[in-house]
Image (tube, grey):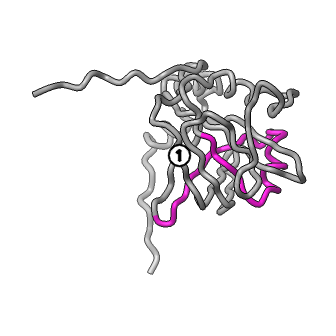
Amino acid sequence: MTETLPARSSGSRRAMGAARALDADGFRRALAVHAAGVVVITAQSRSVPVGLTATSFSSVSLDPPLVSFYVDRSSTTWPALRAADHFAVNVLASDQAELASRFARKDVDRFAEPTRWRPGPLGAPLLQDVSAHLICLPHETVDVGDHILVVGLVAEARVHGQGRPLLYHQGRFGRFIAHPEERA
């Protein structure tokens, strides 16, 4: 049995056309008002540590335990990450903005001093002093627009601290400040 989708009205087609006409800068400005958590994705590829900063990290599923992030198709780090048999998600703490910036830069040895790291149980670099590590096996990748959606199956998760997370908002890194709890 096939299901027929309703025809779009000319009004909805015009709305879709307007959405497609949105320029990249306008879209970027609109998305900048959304705060996002910051992680660094790391892997060992051909005996070389690789990594990148991601603000698109998200949980996907509890059963099985899946997480995701997006990477730009033009990323020079992506081919090495893709070749790795596993990767680590390093959840950054609020005082790690410099580390996030370092892993977002091009043409720099991201793992040189002052970056502090150690090899994880399967070899992926684990950054020190982060809030949590998730060790992931590649599960699926999907080409989506100018990015690649990467889904990982979480094989191991370790929480190291309950501190505040590093956030990315309006092109800058910042800290989360909780609202005071209301008392009844």
* Rendered location of residue 122, percent (x, y): 73, 58
Nearest the viewer among 114 and 49 is: 114
Label 1's element?
strand
Q: Is residue 175 above or below residue 66?
A: above
Nearest the viewer among 73 and 49 is: 49
Residue at 55% across, 58% down: 66
* Rendered location of residue 65, percent (x, y): 51, 61
Residue at 51% across, 66% down: 64
Q: Locate residue 61 relative to residue 151 in the image: left or right.
A: left
* Rendered location of residue 147, percent (x, y): 70, 44
Nearest the viewer among 66 and 6 is: 66
* Rendered location of residue 70, percent (x, y): 65, 44
Q: Which residues are magenta?
A: 63-90
Q: Is residue 95 above or below residue 40?
A: above
Q: Quadrant where the C terminus lies?
A: top left
Q: Quadrant where the N terminus lies?
A: bottom left
Residue 76 placement: quadrant: top right
Q: Which residue is mark 1?
A: 58
Nearest the viewer among 72 and 124 is: 124
Q: Residue furthest bottom?
A: 1
Q: Amino acid at mark 1?
A: Ser
